[in-house]
């Protein structure tokens, strides 16, 4: 019986043999294929996110520049003589329109008796499909 014991001690289980064999061989083909598949999916998602980010930045820049045009026009109009009517033109490649009309709805307050109120509406083209509108800007001007 003592002769059987050394045989049992040297005998390994099949699962242990497979683990030892795998440790020596490195990566299996399926491991490499899974890693390549994951990288391919991530690589396919990356260009779409870059395009979306670029479009968002371009849209923000367009709105920013349209706002600058609007502020420039308001400052220019307030520093000059404002009258009733419609004016339009181009500034920095953007079309704009200013329409102003007398405001007769608000009662004249004591400090404003020497001035008349105008309702001014300003539109600035942001893109072919979007427009920035400054609506109902009330301006007191000398008569």
Image (cartoon, rainbow, N blue to C red):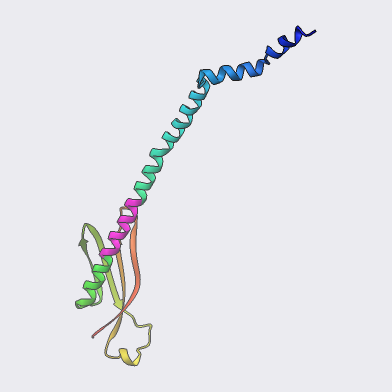
- Residue 33 is left or right of residue 52, and the answer is right
Indicate whether residue 59 is drawn in magenta: yes
Up the image or down, 27 lies above or below 3; here it is: below
Taking depth in this image into account, of 122 and 68 the one nearest to the observer is 68
The quadrant holding residue 94 is bottom left
- Residue 84 is left or right of residue 17, and the answer is left
Q: Quadrant of the C terminus?
A: bottom left
Task: Characterize the magenta stretch by its predominant secondary structure.
Answer: helix
Picture coordinates of residue 34, whole percent (x, y): 51, 27
- Residue 135 is left or right of residue 38, and the answer is left
User: Residue at (75%, 6%) from the top-left corner?
Assistant: 3
User: Residue at (41%, 34%) from the top-left corner?
Assistant: 43
As drawn, the residue found furthest toward the right would be: 1
State the extent of the magenta-drawn residues as a range.
57-69
- Residue 119 is left or right of residue 78, and the answer is right
Picture coordinates of residue 39, whole percent (x, y): 45, 31
Q: Quadrant of the N terminus?
A: top right
As drawn, the residue found furthest toward the bottom would be: 110
Up the image or down, 38 lies above or below 26; here it is: below
Taking depth in this image into account, of 11 and 140 the one nearest to the observer is 11
Picture coordinates of residue 21, whole percent (x, y): 57, 16
């Amino acid at each position: 019986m003592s002769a059987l014991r050394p045989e049992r001690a040297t005998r390994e289980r099949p699962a242990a043999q497979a683990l030892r064999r795998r440790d020596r061989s490195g990566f299996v083909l399926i491991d490499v294929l899974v890693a390549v598949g994951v990288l391919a999916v991530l690589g396919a998602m990356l260009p779409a996110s870059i395009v979306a980010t670029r479009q968002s930045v371009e849209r923000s820049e367009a709105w920013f520049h349209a706002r600058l045009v609007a502020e420039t026009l308001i400052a220019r109009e307030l520093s000059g003589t404002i009258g009733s009517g419609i004016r339009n033109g181009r500034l920095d490649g953007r079309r704009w329109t200013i329409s102003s009309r007398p405001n007769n709805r608000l009662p004249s307050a004591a400090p404003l008796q020497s001035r008349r109120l105008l309702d001014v509406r300003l539109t600035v083209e942001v893109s072919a499909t979007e427009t920035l509108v400054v609506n109902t800007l009330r301006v007191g001007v000398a008569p």
